[in-house]
Image (cartoon, helix red, strand yellow):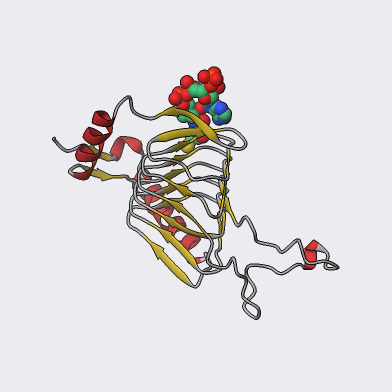
């Protein structure tokens, strides 16, 4: 009984946190969890697909398109690479043109971070706008990602570079995708032991 109550409160907390997000266009999928103290803002668009997890203190301050089955660890930041104009001669950076201005729209207003399905972004990683993280990729904890990440690559460090591959072969990737596509997956705020994790058959 208490467990169900706590699960209900967690669902409400996610709804409340999403309701406080700010962007011209906001689309949030099903079965989504948002941890405490998020900062979810974008000049134009915030899109998060089904079955995603955002940990505590996640900070999104740029347009983003996040796919399905994406795991974003605590303290991850998706930030605008060119949020503030710093090359205006005579203007202190504090007063430089800002990407969120409505009166004088920035050329970088449409920049975004794209994260495809089934990606894990590790604790404390920073991802700059302009980056696309390919399907199935893993970003190691503490990385700073400034370049695109190939599908199923593991990248780490500052700047993030390839440090490994998630699967041993293209055949394994194919099998993973087939099973994932025909599988059934759902999380539960009651805890991991209540989740549905049923990969499909080949
Ligand atoms: C990337 C990660 C998944 C490890 O993957 P792995 O395939 O097991 O990799 P290994 O531990 O064998 O490390 C492979 C190489 O990457 C390096 N590496 C591992 N983690 C790294 C990191 N965070 N930053 C930079 N390099 C890293 C290792 O030093 C190793 O390099 P080497 O071969 O020169 O020694 C793991 O290190 C990680 O960062 N996990 C995220 C943890 C997290 O954020 N948890 C929060 C819960 S949501």
Q: Quadrant of the C terminus?
A: top left
Q: Position of residue 78 (x, y in %)?
A: 56, 52
From the viewer's side, name the closer residue of 185 and 65. 65
Q: Is residue 140 visible?
A: no
Residue at 86% over, 68% down: 90
From the viewer's side, name the closer residue of 181 and 87. 87
Image height of 33 relative to 87, above or below:
above
Q: Quadrant of residue 76?
A: top right
Image height of 29 relative to 77, above or below:
below
Is 23 positioned to the left or the right of 115 in the image? right
Q: Quadrant of residue 89?
A: bottom right
Farthest residue, direction right: 90
Residue at 52% over, 64% down: 21
Is 101 positioned to the left or the right of 18 in the image? right
Is 137 positioned to the left or the right of 183 in the image? right
Q: Quadrant of residue 66?
A: bottom left
Q: Position of residue 196 (x, y in %)?
A: 25, 40
Q: Is residue 165 visible?
A: yes
Residue at 50% over, 49% down: 35
From the viewer's side, name the closer residue of 13 and 90. 90
């Amino acid at each position: 009984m208490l467990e169900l109550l706590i699960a209900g409160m967690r669902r409400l907390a996610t709804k409340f946190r999403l309701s406080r997000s700010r962007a011209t266009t906001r689309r949030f999928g099903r079965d989504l969890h948002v941890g405490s103290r998020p900062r979810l803002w974008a000049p134009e668009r915030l899109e998060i697909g089904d079955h995603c997890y955002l940990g505590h203190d996640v900070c999104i301050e740029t347009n983003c398109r996040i796919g399905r089955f994406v795991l974003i660890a605590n303290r991850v930041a998706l930030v605008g690479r060119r949020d503030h104009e710093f090359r205006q001669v005579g203007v202190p950076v504090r007063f430089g043109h800002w990407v969120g201005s409505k009166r004088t729209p920035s050329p970088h207003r449409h920049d975004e971070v794209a994260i495809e399905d089934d990606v894990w972004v590790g604790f404390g990683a920073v991802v700059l706008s302009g980056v696309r993280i390919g399907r199935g990729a893993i970003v190691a904890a503490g990385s700073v990602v400034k370049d695109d990440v190939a599908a199923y690559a593991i990248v780490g460090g500052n700047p993030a570079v390839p440090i490994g591959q998630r699967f041993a072969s293209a055949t394994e990737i194919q099998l993973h995708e087939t099973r994932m596509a025909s599988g059934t997956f759902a999380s539960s705020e009651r805890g991991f032991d209540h989740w549905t994790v049923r990969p499909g058959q080949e």
